[in-house]
Amino acid sequence: MQRVLVVANNREPLMPCHPARARMLLREGKAAVLRRYPFTIILKDRSTGECQPLELKVDPGSKASGIALVADFQKGRVAVWGMELEHRGQRIKARLESRRALRRTRRSRKTRYRAPRFKNRTRPRGWLPPSLMSRVWNIDTWAKRLRRFAPVTSVAVETARFDMQRLVNPEISGAEYQQGTLFGYEVREYLLEKWGRRCVYCSAEDVPLEVEHIVPKIRGGSNRVSNLTLACRTCNQTKGSLTAEEFGHPDVQKHALKPLRDAAAVNSTRYAVGEALKAHGLPVAFWSGGRTKYNRTKQGYPKTRWIDAACVGESGALVRLDPKACVLRVKAMGHGARQMCGTDKYGFPVRHRLNKSVHFGFQTGDIVRAIVPRGKFAGVHTGRITVRASGSFGLGAADGISHKHCTATHRKDGYSYG
């Protein structure tokens, strides 16, 4: 069962307690709610307490990561708290590509002169794209938060490394590692031989052929040669943003292998996560993904992110946990956009944002409890709000709730909770 985080009256972290004990302390007035997410209580009459060793375990992933707190009690190791953290790397990448496309349109628009930047810019050693660093920062942020509310004494991180070529061809070995798909070919020549020098959709021959994505990039496809084919201009334009299967050619779709974007993201960030956690000053241990899988399957636990995190390393070989426990679900939302002026498809300004983000004491992203006495949305509503300068807020499906009916339960911190 998910335990409740506890801190003393001097804000020193204590051992997490059972939910029943937390309810009793709150009911008797010996404690108060310090924070809703993660749910934490603060004791009113205690400043110290005996603490058991508590290990913070992390299972980094591309789209989501698992985090667990495992206590080393005298009777054995117990997972006392867990969470699953959903990243926003793909959304960041999409926004950066949108910004790049908008800036490129300046070349064909009559805009003010923008002096060129110096051309010898260099990136620092170990640089990673913002879409990848957001994963590292999310894990680092939550490690800092949990250290404030729990007596963490050590950290264990899974550093999974994926063999990209073996994911494509499990039988690969020896010199084949150095001889990729395009060994001895250029991309276009390879595609011409592979697809018989004709359009794969209409079988037209002796016409100009264009290199085309089987799964469009806008739909998650990559530039890997396994996702490229040849098509005439007519078929290429007619297909548009459809996949080959949606375009009526499932046989072509079979040639497109699964993108390795997620595996590449984990490979790129595995050491960056470890370096970020080392900065906390705690002993950090690194363990393989194979060890995690062995520990989980040996104990018969299902495959979930937070359970994988609890099974990381040597201490995960024998850990007690409830597979059906209701853990905290967290989704990275960011702190809002920096763009002050919105444009139409031609690049002309159509809307402007206000410099003020707080209205009537609330801002977009706050979690509130609204008690609406009458009207279409009469009742009690709880969730993340979208504020407006008029004082009429949006709360889930309920739109137009007055700020007078709202009470903040958790202030905006860049994440949403489930």
Image (cartoon, helix red, strand yellow):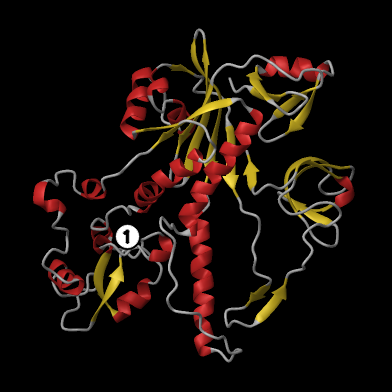
User: In the figure, is residue 376 to the left or right of 179?
Assistant: right
Q: Amino acid at mark 1?
A: Glu
Q: Quadrant of the N terminus?
A: top right
Give residue 270's quadrant in the image.
top left
Helix, strand or loop at mark 1: loop
Percent position of residue 283, x then y? 47, 30
Instruction: Mark 1: give few (<14), some (14-19) or many (20+) Cα within 10 Å.
Output: some
Q: Quadrant of the C terminus?
A: top right
User: In this rendering, is residue 213 above or below 234?
Assistant: above
User: In this rendering, is residue 236 above or below 262?
Assistant: below
Percent position of residue 395, x then y? 74, 49
Residue under the image location 43 percent in, 57 percent down: 128
- Of residue 195 and residue 27, the one placed in the foreground of this image is 27
Percent position of residue 97, x then y? 48, 68
| Residue 392 is at least partly visible in this image | yes
Residue under the image location 71 percent in, 14 percent down: 21
Give residue 408's quadrant in the image.
top right
Q: Label 1, on which residue?
A: 245
User: In this rendering, is residue 84 above or below 211?
Assistant: above
- Of residue 174 and residue 126, the one placed in the foreground of this image is 126
Percent position of residue 387, x then y? 78, 56
Give residue 389's quadrant in the image.
bottom right
Q: How many marks?
A: 1
